[in-house]
Amino acid sequence: MKISLPAGIVVLSTLIVQITSSIVPITNPSRPTITSIPLMASLEMPAHKLFNIDENNGFENLAVRSNGQILATTAFPSALLWYIDPLSIRPPVLLQNFTSLTATLGITELQPDMFYVVGTGTDSPGSIFSVDMRPFLVLPNGTIFTSPVINEIGSLPSAIALNGMTRLHMNDHFVLIADTVLGGVWKFDVENGESDLIIQDSSMRGPQNKTSFAGFGINGLRTQNNTLFYTNSGAQTMYKMPLHVNGSSAGNATLITSGLSCDDFAIDSWGLAYVASPSNALIQVDTWTGTQLVLAGTFDDTISDMIGPTSVHFGRCISDQTSVYVTLNGGSFTDPTPGSQGISRVDVGDLAEAFLN
């Protein structure tokens, strides 16, 4: 039996066939196609200074709360934890002075508004603190109405020089901590205080016969899709390594890029890393190709708002989710450029939009 379709349906069916036949299949839907650029290029995006610290303390690392507020650590001579409102509705507030330490270093969030901080001091190679921001309430004038709950929950007595920290998985109870001198990664259980040197690899060791920052090994680290990404500051390299679910290595380290002046970093869902460069720049690294792109700052410039970057974190609100916040130590913890220690924001929204199109 022959069925006659209404004219409107026939026309619509014809249009669908024409449209679908012209669609080109996506060969790799996990990331956008990026036009090839030179190994090192520069966009020179502006950096906007949000906050300067008057004391002689350089900012070392940061985390961003779900409401957009920033928690930032400082190192040498004092170990401090700061609260900073990126909208400047409230003034910066000093949350804690860890008087027994000389530096607060990595900071990460495991559960909503539950953060963990690693610190070091003369008598302690590594102490871990929990920072419960859930009860925290600050008045518009900066007066703390309800303080966060901060407790020391454990230590790593066998560590040598702890540095960056990241979570193993969201909402579990393990953090991973880089040991810059030992050349490895510690796994720490925030519930019972147990620790284990879960990874040690030659790619994480610093150059021999070098001192200070030039002798550092693994520094910043991040996990994504069961892969550990990490920088080696002394070797000026960035690597990735597959992980088992428990955080142990599931394969060999793969070199992403070299010749990279690097400290800590953030990484987006496309696998693009935003690296704090001690050479006074914010560098984007494509972790698939190794291409480096200077987004902001100028190498060895001493008059910009990007002097001594140490770490990077994306904003978490609709208004700043395509912006990154960068902590700055002023180029040196011992002799910083006056007025340069603080936090800057770089809006990478236009760049992100280009990658999404």
Image: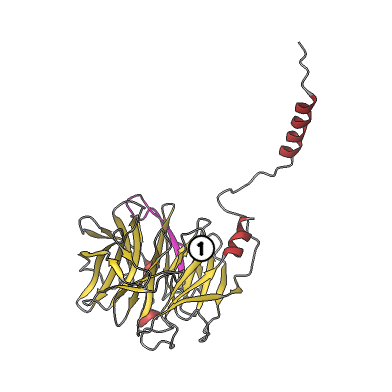
What element does badge 1 sit on? loop
Quick check: is 247 in the magenta stretch? yes
| Image quadrant containing the N terminus | top right
Q: In this view, does 346 lie to the left or right of 15?
A: left
Quick check: is 64 in the magenta stretch? no
Nearer to us in this view, 212 or 121: 121
The answer to whether residue 164 shows anywhere in this view is no
The answer to whether residue 148 shows anywhere in this view is yes
Nearer to us in this view, 8 or 260: 8
Q: Where is residue 20 in the image (x, y as percent from the top left)?
A: 71, 38
Q: Is residue 289 above or below residue 125?
A: above
| Other residues around mark 1 within 10 Å, as few (<14) / some (14–19) / many (≥20) | some
Magenta stretch in the rendered image: 238-254
Q: Name the residue under label 1.
A: 320
Q: Is residue 302 above or below residue 251?
A: below
**Quarter of the image where one finds residue 68:** bottom left
Q: Where is residue 168 in the image (x, y as percent from the top left)?
A: 35, 55
Q: Where is residue 237 in the image (x, y as percent from the top left)?
A: 46, 70
Residue at 51% across, 67% down: 257
Q: Position of residue 277 (x, y in %)?
A: 48, 75
Nearer to us in this view, 41 or 104: 104
**Quarter of the image where one finds residue 13:** top right
Residue at 56% across, 73% down: 294
Magenta stretch prevailing secondary structure: loop
Color encoding of the figure: secondary structure
The amino acid type found where label 1 is placed reads Asp
